[in-house]
Image (spheres, rainbow, N blue to C red):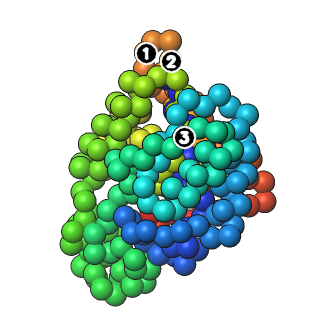
Amino acid sequence: MRLLLVRHGQSEGNAAGIVQGSMDFGLTELGALQAKVTAERLAREEIHRIVSSPLRRAADTAVAISEGTGVTIEFADGLREYDIGAASGLTAAEIRERFPDVAEARRRGERLPFPGEEGRDAFHARLRSVLDQIQGAGGTTVAVAHGGVVGAMCQIVVGLGPRHRGLFEAANCSVTEILRDAGGRLVIARHNDTCHLSGIVTRLDRG
């Protein structure tokens, strides 16, 4: 089993500094270029399967990869970005203004949920289910998703729980590779690989 996790190209929400969560945003012109360059790189790989989050920023990135590799896309709702609830669609400044108690708690290292937030335990549970499905398929799978998804998948592989978020950041259209080693364990072979994005790397991640 080989899994290539690709974060979507720069989205309109990324460029505007918006916390996107499960809201739908398309790619910017730069994001579309990042997707095209990533597709050219992955066209040199032997890809058996492409799965994608149905959110437009990921789906549009997956379409570019599909066109470059000739592999059909399967959409997986489980690859959606973490749903931040009522904070979705807001900038960091707007979040501090509308939810001062939550913002202050987070500054103290506490984690109060926003109204309607998905919850990290539920997020990890759905990603474990997706990871189990990918392992069962075998071969090389490209999964096009979101920064939060890439980070949480890496946490799951190394055995960290939901509270350790933020340890595995991913640039737009970076590639993170997860393999099964000789002992049958899942390992991270490379993380946040952007060597194909020379001069066009963007890193801001608000979902």
Q: Please tell me whether mark 3 sits on a helix, a strand or a loop.
A: loop
Query: Does the CB distance between marks 2 and 1 fall below 8 Å?
Result: yes
Q: Check if mark 2's residue and mark 3's residue have beta carbons within 8 Å.
A: no
Residue annotated with mark 2: 181
User: Which comes before the other along the chain, label 2 or label 3?
Assistant: 3
Residue beneath the point at 34% across and 47% down:
78
Which residue is most to the top? Answer: 182
**Relative to the observer, which residue lies in front, 132 or 176?**
132
Residue receiving disc 3: 72
Relative vertical location of residue 22 with respect to residue 178 in this rendering, above or below:
below
Q: CA distance from mark 3 to mark 1?
A: 28 Å
Q: Quadrant of residue 159?
A: top left
Foreground pick, 34 / 155: 34
Residue occupying the point 48% across, 62% down: 56
Residue 116 visible in this rendered orientation of the protein: yes
Q: Could you tell me residue 148's position as x and y percent?
A: 43, 54
Q: At which x and y percent is residue 110?
A: 26, 63
* Pointer 3 or 1: first along the chain: 3
Q: Which mark is residue 137?
A: none
Residue type for callout 2: Asp
Relative horizontal placement of residue 156, taking residue 30 as reference (left or right)? left
* Residue holding disc 1: 184
**Number of the front mark, 2 or 3:** 3
Q: Secondary structure at mark 1?
A: loop
What secondary structure is found at the residue carrying circle 2? loop
On-image quarter of the C terminus: bottom left
Say above or below: 144 vs 137.
below
Q: Picture coordinates of residue 90 (x, y %)?
A: 40, 79
* Quarter-of-image position of residue 68: top right
Figure check: 56 above or below 159: below
Which kind of residue does numbered mark 1 sit on? Answer: Gly
Q: Amino acid at mark 3?
A: Thr
